[in-house]
């Protein structure tokens, strides 16, 4: 959940596709090392979630660079939700859980090889796994559909840089 302002149709404004701040390199690398997920994917999630703001708090209470809900942070072992490294590692653990659930362990090192699993994992990260299950895929929420598109596009861009 991000802090972006809604557009006329209620969907959040698209994220500016800037490169992540250089100070995020260490937290992203730590999260990638801890989970096996590509740094480019984690950087894309961070950019869309918080634009790299470690103190970001959404209207729903999600916090930090990967916008973890407090209960999710506890579930993935995060003690200091505003610590960029802890938040990145926790968010990566949570995302990895859904990537494996939807596509298996083979999707972890290269989620681009599993586009459907990646789409579902991102939707679960944004809207919750129960919502993805209820709709049998990406829910018909503009915010979640835009989120999945933005993260996927940024991931492709960061992979190619």
Image: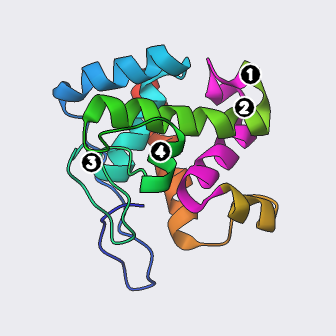
* x then y, percent, for residue 19: 26, 35
Query: Which quadrant holds the C terminus?
Result: top left
Disc 3: CA contacts within 10 A as few (<14), some (14-19) or many (>=20) = many
Question: According to the image, label 1 marks what residue?
Answer: 105
Q: Dividing the picture into quarters, in which one does residue 106 lie?
A: top right
Which numbered circle lies on residue 74?
Answer: 4
- Earlier along the polypeptide chain: callout 2 or callout 4? 4
Q: Residue furthest bottom?
A: 8
The secondary structure that most of the magenta stretch takes on is: helix
User: Is there any visible trace of residue 142 in the rendered image?
Assistant: yes
Q: CA distance from mark 1 to mark 4?
A: 24 Å
Q: Dividing the picture into quarters, in which one does residue 59 lie?
A: bottom left
User: In the figure, is residue 120 to the left or right of 46?
Assistant: right
Q: Magenta stretch containing residue 150, yes or no?
A: no
Q: CA distance from mark 4 to mark 3?
A: 23 Å
Q: Residue furthest right?
A: 136
* x then y, percent, for residue 58: 32, 65
The residue tagged with tag 4: helix, strand or loop? helix
Q: CA distance from mark 2 to mark 1?
A: 5 Å
- Earlier along the polypeptide chain: callout 4 or callout 3? 3
Q: Are marks 2 and 1 in contact (CB under 8 Å)?
A: yes
User: In the figure, is residue 108 to the left or right of 40?
Assistant: right
Disc 1: CA contacts within 10 A as few (<14), some (14-19) or many (>=20) = some
Which numbered circle lies on residue 36?
Answer: none
* Highlighted range, magenta: 107-128
Question: According to the image, label 3 marks what residue?
Answer: 51
Question: According to the image, label 2 marks what residue?
Answer: 100
- Earlier along the polypeptide chain: callout 2 or callout 1? 2
Q: Residue at x 36, y 65 (%)?
A: 61
């Amino acid at each position: 959940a991000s802090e972006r302002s809604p557009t006329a149709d209620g969907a959040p404004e698209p994220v500016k596709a800037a490169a992540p701040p250089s100070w995020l390199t260490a937290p992203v690398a730590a999260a990638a090392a801890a989970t096996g997920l590509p740094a480019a994917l984690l950087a894309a999630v961070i950019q869309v979630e918080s634009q790299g703001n470690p103190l970001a708090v959404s209207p729903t209470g999600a916090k930090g660079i990967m916008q973890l809900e407090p209960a999710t942070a506890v579930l993935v072992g995060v003690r200091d939700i505003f610590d960029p490294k802890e938040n990145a590692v926790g968010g990566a653990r949570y995302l990895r859980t859904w990537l494996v659930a939807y596509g298996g362990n083979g999707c972890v090192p290269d989620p681009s090889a599993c586009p459907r699993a990646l789409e579902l994992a991102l939707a679960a990260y944004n809207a919750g796994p129960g919502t993805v299950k209820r709709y049998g895929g990406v829910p018909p929420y503009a915010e979640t559909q835009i989120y999945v598109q933005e993260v996927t596009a940024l991931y492709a861009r960061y992979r190619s840089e």
